Amino acid sequence: MILIADCGSTKIDWCLIDGNNIEKQVFTCGMNAVMLSEEEIRLRIAEELLPELGTLAASVDAVFFYGAGCISPEVCGNVSRALKANLPSAANVEVYSDLLAAARALCGHQSGIACILGTGSNSCFYDGREIVANVSPLGFILGDEGSGAVLGKLFLGDMLKNQLPDDITQSFLKEYDLDLLGVIRRVYREPQPNRFLASVAPFLAKNISCPQIHGLVTGSFKAFFSRNIRQYDSYGSYPVNFIGSIARVFRRQLIEAAEATGCTVGLTVKSPMQGLISYHSSNV
């Protein structure tokens, strides 16, 4: 049996499959492997995953782990050794980035452009097996165009600079139980400001009919296509496929931005797991 993991900072989706059949699906707390030692990762797996798998843990033949932060040999090695320590029956353990998870889930064994559009953003050109080109996302301060964090950053900046209708500003402050100083504190003084910024996205979706918000969202998506997708050779020959909640919620605005920049939107999927199951089942 194969164990597939889609690991984000908030949660890990583990799926144990036998061919096309799902034997067990488990959700545990998320992690960014860059921030943890090998021992910390091992303990988390032991304490959170193994009790959920129970006796099925001994039936795992292979593990394919896709995770945020799994981009260096050192980090991938830490995760791999932690998995092998907890799942000794697994003869094959492979650790990859969350971007490769998106590519394999969206494109399968075909070439294509795959993107993540959630709290952060990322993109790549994929040859059917591996990522062959990637424009660095650079994070929400220097890049991450179109992401939830950047949409939140742009909205709050416009709000604090009095660029939005007063009723929108007051509605936001009331809904999020904040005042102007509270916004500054959450962004500049509290940890993980990207998560706070991305939490603004549902408010933007609810108020997308406001011209200023519509323009902000589509403008950020246009920047995503212009600054990232258009750098890939033959970008006009492939649809641009997306994993992530932002792509799903704002699909209409994403299509509008794509058309304005000479691109075409393909799939928009919230989670990569079903596509990963199909990909690895076809490799058996």
Image (cartoon, rainbow, N blue to C red):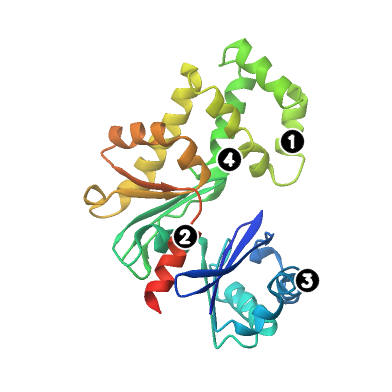
Mark 1 crowdedness (10 Å alpha carbons): few <14, some 14-19, many ≥20? some
In primary-sequence order, the first of circles 2 and 3 is 3
Query: Horizontal and vertical percent for residue 130?
Result: 38, 69
Q: Which quadrant holds residue 68?
A: bottom right
Q: Amino acid at mark 3?
A: Glu
Q: Is residue 146 visible?
A: no
Query: Horizontal and vertical percent for residue 5?
Result: 57, 67
Question: Residue at coordinates 35% horizontally, 35% vertically from top-left?
Answer: 255
Q: If the image is split into quadrants, where does the C terminus sit? A: bottom left
Position above or below: 77 against 190: below
In primary-sequence order, the first of circles 1 and 2 is 1
In primary-sequence order, the first of circles 3 and 1 is 3
Q: Left or right: 201 with respect to 251?
A: right
In primary-sequence order, the first of circles 4 and 2 is 4
Whole-number angstrom distance, CA of label 3 to CA of label 4: 31 Å
Pointer 3: what residue?
A: 47
Q: Which quadrant holds residue 206?
A: top right
In primary-sequence order, the first of circles 1 and 4 is 4
Whole-number angstrom distance, CA of label 1 to CA of label 4: 13 Å
Pointer 4: what residue?
A: 149
Question: Residue at coordinates 68% horizontally, 42% vertically from top-left?
Answer: 193
In primary-sequence order, the first of circles 3 and 4 is 3
Pointer 1: what residue?
A: 186
Q: Amino acid at mark 2?
A: Gln
Whole-number angstrom distance, CA of label 4 to CA of label 2: 26 Å
Pointer 2: what residue?
A: 274
